[in-house]
Structure formats: structure tokens, C-alpha cells
Amino acid sequence: MPALNIDTRIADASAPGWSIHAETLDPALLRLQLPGVRGCTTHAVRLSLTPTRPRNRSAGLLLRVSVEPGEVVVVADEGKVNAGTEPALLARTRASDSPDYGETELELGVALPAAGPPRLLVVWYLPVELATADGGSPTAALPMPIPTLSAEDAEPELIIEGDAVDAFIAADLPPVLQTGVAVTLTVRLSRQELDDVAGRRNAQDPIRIDPRRKVRVKLRRQNLRVVPGTRDRLDFDYPATGTIATGVFHVIGVEPGDAVAWLMVFQTEVFPLATLRLDVTVTTDVVADTNSLVTGRAAFQRLDPRLRNVPVLAVHEDVVDGRSTLTFELKLPNGRRRTYTGRPRPDKAEYLAGLYNRIEALWDRHKSKPSVEVRRRAFDADLAQYGVEMAADFLPSALRSDLRTNWDRLDGLALITTETDIPWEVVAVEADEDSKSGPRFLGEKGMTRWLCEGDHPIALTLRRGHRRFLCPEYRSEKYRLPHLVLERDLLTTGLEADEITPGAADELGRQLHTRDFDLLHFGGHGDIEMRDGVPSQRLLLAEFDEDIPSEAAVYRAGRLTKDYARPHPALPEPAPEIERKTGPVVVLNACRVGRSARTGIEAFAPALLTGGAAIVLGCLWRIEDDAATDFVRTFYDELGKKCTMAEALATARSTVRRRGNASWLAYSLYSHPFATVDFHTDNPQDREDTP
């Protein structure tokens, strides 16, 4: 008969003549000494079997379980485990080691114990394997705990504060890889600044860590494959004075072209301490050795203790063979955490192009509705349908269930991500069956995005004389935006911002290059142009006319790699009292410029953030002129009241939503959720002397 209350990681369990009850156990609290189990317990379930008929009971159980890359699943007789007798293990299976295959299902046949109604333990664990520093074969390591879904009363996650110490984390990889040839990506942890390695792409970052806990480095990648049998995660202890802790990943370049490795550094928190990025090239040619230094730098993170109470959805992406595989982690304010793996998608770009086209068509479909309220309901109903479809297509069923169950705990949700294409704000969670409410959008929770490669300051000052804006007065009548006059007045009168003149592309590029601004606001047209088969975002300036092409009349996102490249100063001394100047706030109130290319080269948001911007607000799809002005007016008003970025975003969204406009979820905000701005404090050096 069918199993009752089967756990989300058991797809099916059948044993004719038995009823089955599943009880999910907390692996963080589980203390099992199973023979042959050496690794990190990630999930555990107790199966209690009760006979349904006195005779002819089956002596076998068939299980179909969900496993993630590298996981081992064992089934044990709980009675023998508790008694310490052999043989306790009844069945064992293992998933593929390669992270490229995503979540899969495996079957186990289990011979049931003959004595008494059986109670079985099903345990998932990751055998921890660290590659050797000299590039040799992986070796077994002692079991180490990993983040997992903990009990309701579990100890809240650690946010590093007064007991932290300084350290340096560095990574290096050959700048050019030959397709199909394995190379080592080396990671080093030290108490002192480390030298760059000649002939390698280098990245290094000073970090603050708790010396009592492991430092975990997770590899995310684009166009790189992890060698089967090796891990995509390393764990380090805090090294002794004068020593360097070293570990390596083994990777292979997949296809000719660009490739990226992201090294995300954690301890017990969901927010990364640092993210090191290594950009390399994959070629079919034989790669010659080089002794030239190729160096990069990463962003320095100091974590805000308030983040321990923020609900977090972490979304990370690996792209291999053109397939996107997403992994998720949900952390609730009560300390509960759980990880999930999605299935690879080969058609992500095509899927999202179709989705954005459908969303942009909503205005034309519903603009003739007789009232604002009727239009709002129609917009929301269509958006909800798209959002539910996206949730089903991208989110594992267990994650959808957990979001639905914990909806009331998600206020102020922060999205930590290396994936910047999907409009996560529109993803919708269906309500419980007994609820009268419809699907609910993640964007309703004031969701801010935390890009792993950027800076995330908490307090920003927007000084008078350092606020810039560009709202083009379009020469061609067909491009004029009536409400842009109101937006320009808001910026000049309300925010006392200075207009960028002349408003041509080179002048905008010069302003970006000088980096002499605290606020940069663009209000006008934006679009996406295909150049040599690659989508490229651009801002349309005053002289733009599609019938008369002119490079002076457009500012392309690709220019930011030159105009707004992050400077690479020497690494600072590891002194906690040093305060770095925060980056600026950038608002791009223009259609479609909030989307991101995977590499960040032809998209504004990631290029600005990696260049040093602290906060970036942009639009994911086409927005209406009046809604755009209403949104930024409300957003700036709320910031002026000392509201946080998350609060200002939520209020601005709700204001536009009441107008019945599909633009209310169009805005994505990359920011620390608790960041605030000060419009009123001037730098004394910027004031004129008064008698």
C-alpha cells in the first residue's frame, strides 16, 4: 500500500503487505555511528513499517530517492545501529560525482529484517574529498559538518563580530586552458598577504573570519567542468602563523571561448565573506607556458550582524555545455536552513526571452480596461500565472513547499545570487489549498538582490555637488516622454542634482571614468540591441534616431569595462578600523537595462557593481512613462525619511501596483537590505566658506 507522510527526498517507497511512515530527522542533531559512513550527513529519515496483513508479507522494500551530485545514500537497521551489532547496513548507493548532472533519482532494493516490525534509517551524506596540493588523486578527509536544515530551536547562524581575526584568501588558475585538458585551480589561505603566482590568473581578498570554524570555499563556474571524482568545495582550518593552507580544484575547459570561476568564501553564514572571480579563456590550441603576472582583485566584505535575522534565498548557477544548473539555499530568521538542487536547463535564454516578451505585452493587453482596479487585477492575474510557471520550471518542489509554508517569515527577503538573468521578483508561490488568497510574488517581500561580486555598504552619503543626472530631451518627437519633465524637476529641485551636459555618450563616459559622483541617475529610453549575435544593453540619448545611427547618441553597457573598471590598489593592511569609501548609488530608470548577461560584459547592473557601485536600481522589462516617474519619486521620498533600501523598494512597488501597472515588479535593486542614504550631510570640504 502507499507510504504515508513520505519525506520530500523519497520519491517512492513500496513494500507489499506493509504500511510505511516516514519521519524526517535533523542531520545536524543526528549522532549515528554507521559503519562505513565517513562524511557530512545532509539528510536523514526514519521509516517505520507496520504489517497490514498477517501472512505473505513482502520481505523486500523498494525505495526511489532523490540525490544530489556526490551524495551517498545508505539504509540501516536502526535496532542494530543502536545495539552496535553487525551487519547494520542493508543497502547503499551513490550519485555521480560530477556537479554537472544536478539532482537525480536512484532506486534501492532493501531486504527487510526478519525479526519484528522493522525500523529503518535512510541517511544521505557527502563523503568529503579534498584534492591534494600537488595535483594528485583526491584523498579522503575526516567528516566535517556542512550547513543544512536545522531544528526550530537550533542555534542561530554565526555572524562574525568581535572575535574575528584577519586572513587573506587567494586563488589562481592558468589564464588560458586547452579544451579537455585538466588543470588545477589553487586556493590558499594565510594570515599574511600572499604573493601572486607568475603565469596564472590571480585573485586575492582580505577577509575577517572566526578562527574556531572552518573556512569553506565553494566553486561556481561557467564553461568549466569539475573533473569527475573530485570535489567542488574545499574546507580550511585557520592556518598557523607563517604557514599557508592550500587546496586545489581540478577543472577542465569545455568549449572554446570565455570561462569564469567564482570562488565563494563562507563560514557558517549564508552571506559570502568574499567572492574571488577568475576570468580565463578556453582554446583548442596547445597552451604554452607563460611567466607573466595576471592579477585580479575581489571585493572586501564585512558582514552586518543584523543579517542574522534576514530571510535569505541564495541562488547560484553553474553553466556547463550550455546547460544552466541552479542550486538554492533557504535560510529563515529562526536559523532553519535547507539546500536544494534544480535540474539542468539547456534552453534558459530562449525561455527567458519568451517570458519577457509576454510580460511586456501585458500593458497593450489591458490598457483599455475600464478602471484602475480592473486593470490592476488583470495585470496581477497574468503576472501570477507567469510567476507560478517560473516557480514550477526553476524551483525544486521541496523549495516551493518550504516557501509556501514559511511565507509569513519571508518579510525583507534578500536574494544572494550569482544568477542575474531570471526575474526572481516575479516568481510566485501558490497559497495553501485552504487559503482564499491567490499566488504571492517574491517581490512583495521587499526583495533586494545581493550580487556576490559587489560591495555592500550600509550607510551612504549623497553629497550636494556630487549628485548627477541625465534625463535626455529627445530631439525626435517619437521618443519624447511627457513625464520625464516631472522626473527632471524631481532631480533638480527635490534632490538638488546637477545635470550632465552635454548629454552625449562620451560625456557620460567621462563622468563615469572620473568616479566623482555619489548619485548617478539616468531617466529615459533603454533597450537591448543584438550585436554580432550577442545582446547588448544601451541607454538612448537625446540625439537618438534609429533611422540615423550615431554612436554619440547611445551609451552601451560594454563601454563600462573601460569607463568604469574597478581600480586595483594594493591590498589594505588587515586592520578592522580602516574604513573604505563607499561606491555610488546608480539609478537607471529606463526599459530593460536591469537584465544581465551571464558574463556581465554587455549588461549594466553587474558591470557597475563589479566596477565599484554600491547600489544599482534598474528595470527588467518595458515600463510605462508615468509609472517610472511615480516609482523613483516614491523611492527617493522613502530614502529621504531614513527608510532602508528594502523598505523604500517595497513602498515604491506598492505605490505603482495601486495604479494597475505591470511595471510594479519591473525594478530590481542590488543593495544591502539595510542600507540607508543621507541626502543632507555635506562634506565640509565641499562647502563654500561663509563669513
Image (cartoon, rainbow, N blue to C red):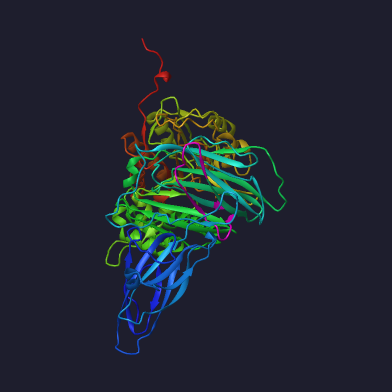
Q: Which residue is drawn at 37% across and 65% down?
A: 44
Q: Which residue is drawn at 39% across and 76% down?
A: 13
In the displayed image of the protein, which residue is found farthest to the front? 85
* In the image: residue 664, left or right of residue 573: left
Rendered location of residue 662, percent (x, y): 41, 52
Decide which of 59, 178 is in the foreground and name it: 59
Screen quadrant of the N terminus: bottom left
* In the image: residue 684, left or right of residue 219: left
Query: In the displayed structure, would residue 574 be above or below residue 156?
Result: above
Rendered location of residue 656, percent (x, y): 36, 47
Rendered location of residue 118, percent (x, y): 32, 77
Residue 622 shows up from this direction:
no
* In the image: residue 658, left or right of residue 190: left
In the displayed image of the protein, which residue is found farthest to the bottom? 55
The magenta segment = 221-245
Decide which of 200, 661 is in the foreground and name it: 200
Whether the magenta-drawn stretch holds residue 249 is answered as: no
Screen quadrant of the C terminus: top left
Whether the magenta-drawn stretch holds residue 244 is answered as: yes
Residue 161 shows up from this direction:
yes
Q: Toward which corner of the image does residue 640 lie, by quadrant?
A: top left
Decide which of 164, 432 is in the foreground and name it: 164
